[in-house]
Image: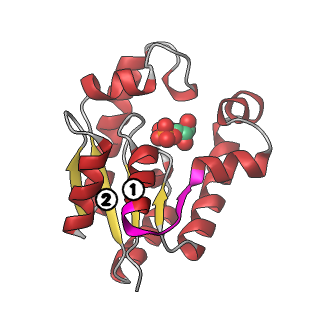
C-alpha cells in the first residue's frame, strides 16, 4: 500500500508546507481540508467565519474531513481545530487502526508566530493573537497527543527536514 499520513497541529505548525514536501518525497497526492472547504463554500475561510459563523464552518469542516479521510490515500493536512470534533477523532482512530500515520506537528509560540503572522487578523486569533494561540494550543494539545502515532517538533528545522524525518519514521 502507498504510504499515507494525516498531519495535525495548530496554526503555524507548518502542516500545509510539510504536507507538500512529504507528498513529493512519497510521490503521492497532497490534500488540505482548508482548501476543500474554501472550494465547496466558494469563499475564504475568514469570510465563512464572519458571514456564517464558526458552527457553520465546523460543520463544513466535519464533512470535508470525513470525505478526505475516506477517499484520499496520500498526505492529508487538517485545519488546526478539526480534531476537536468527536466524529473526526473517531475517524482518525480508525485510520490509524488501518495502518495510517497521524502526525502531530508540535510547535512553540515563538516559532508559530512569524509563520502565521499572529499580528494579522485570523478568525480565531482576533483580539490578542498570541494569547488566543496559546489558549487554543493548551486546549488542543492533549487531543493532538492522544491521536498522534508520531509527534515531530517543527521548531528550528526546515519543512524539508521534518518531511524527511516523517518519511523515515513511518
Ligand atoms: C483553525 C485553523 C485554520 C482554519 C480555521 C480554523 C483552527 O487552519 O481551519 O481558520 O481552529 O485552528 P490552519 O491550522 O491551517 O491555520
The type of colouring in the image is: secondary structure
Q: Which residues are magenta?
A: 25-33
Q: Is residue 28 magenta?
A: yes
> What percent of the width, then of the height, locates residue 43?
77, 38
- Which element carries disc 1, helix, strand or loop? strand
Which residue in the rendered view is the most extreme toward the bottom?
1
- Which element carries disc 2, helix, strand or loop? strand
Q: Is residue 95 magenta?
A: no
> What percent of the width, then of the height, locates residue 144?
32, 52
Q: CA distance from mark 2 to mark 1?
A: 5 Å
Number of labels in the image equals 2
Residue shown at 19% from the left, 67% from the top: 169
In the rendered view, would you say 109 is above or below 33? above
Which residue in the rendered view is the most extreme toward the right?
42
Q: Nearer the viewer, residue 88 or 31?
A: 31
Residue 128 occupies quadrant:
top left
Residue shown at 48% from the left, 60% from the top: 76
Q: Nearer the viewer, residue 131 or 68?
A: 68
- The residue carrying mark 2 is 103
* Label at residue 7: 1
Residue shown at 44% from the left, 69% from the top: 27
Quadrant housing the N terminus: bottom left
Residue 155 occupies quadrant:
top left
In the rendered view, would you say 101 is above or below 148? below
Query: On the picture, is 89 further left or further right than 160?
Result: right
Residue 146 occupies quadrant:
bottom left
Query: On the picture, is 31 further left or further right than 23?
Result: right
Q: Are marks 2 and 1 in contact (CB under 8 Å)?
A: yes
Q: Nearer the viewer, residue 137 or 43?
A: 43
> What percent of the width, then of the height, locates residue 111?
27, 27
Q: Nearer the viewer, residue 153 or 142?
A: 153
Amino acid at each position: 500500500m502507498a504510504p499515507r499520513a494525516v498531519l495535525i497541529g495548530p496554526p503555524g505548525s507548518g502542516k500545509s508546507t510539510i504536507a507538500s514536501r512529504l507528498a513529493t518525497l512519497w510521490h503521492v497526492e497532497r490534500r488540505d481540508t482548508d482548501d476543500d472547504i474554501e472550494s465547496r463554500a466558494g469563499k475564504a475561510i475568514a469570510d465563512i467565519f464572519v458571514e456564517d459563523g464558526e458552527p457553520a464552518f465546523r460543520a463544513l469542516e466535519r464533512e470535508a474531513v470525513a470525505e478526505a479521510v475516506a477517499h484520499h490515500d496520500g498526505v492529508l493536512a487538517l485545519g488546526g481545530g478539526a480534531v476537536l470534533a468527536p466524529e473526526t477523532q473517531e475517524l482518525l482512530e480508525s485510520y490509524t487502526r488501518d495502518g495510517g500515520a497521524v502526525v502531530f506537528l508540535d510547535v512553540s509560540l515563538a516559532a508559530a508566530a512569524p509563520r502565521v503572522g499572529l499580528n494579522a487578523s485570523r478568525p480565531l486569533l482576533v483580539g490578542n493573537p498570541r494569547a488566543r494561540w496559546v489558549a487554543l494550543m493548551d486546549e488542543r494539545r492533549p487531543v493532538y497527543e492522544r491521536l498522534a502515532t508520531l509527534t515531530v517538533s517543527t521548531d528550528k528545522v526546515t519543512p524539508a527536514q521534518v518531511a524527511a524525518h516523517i518519511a523515515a519514521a513511518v
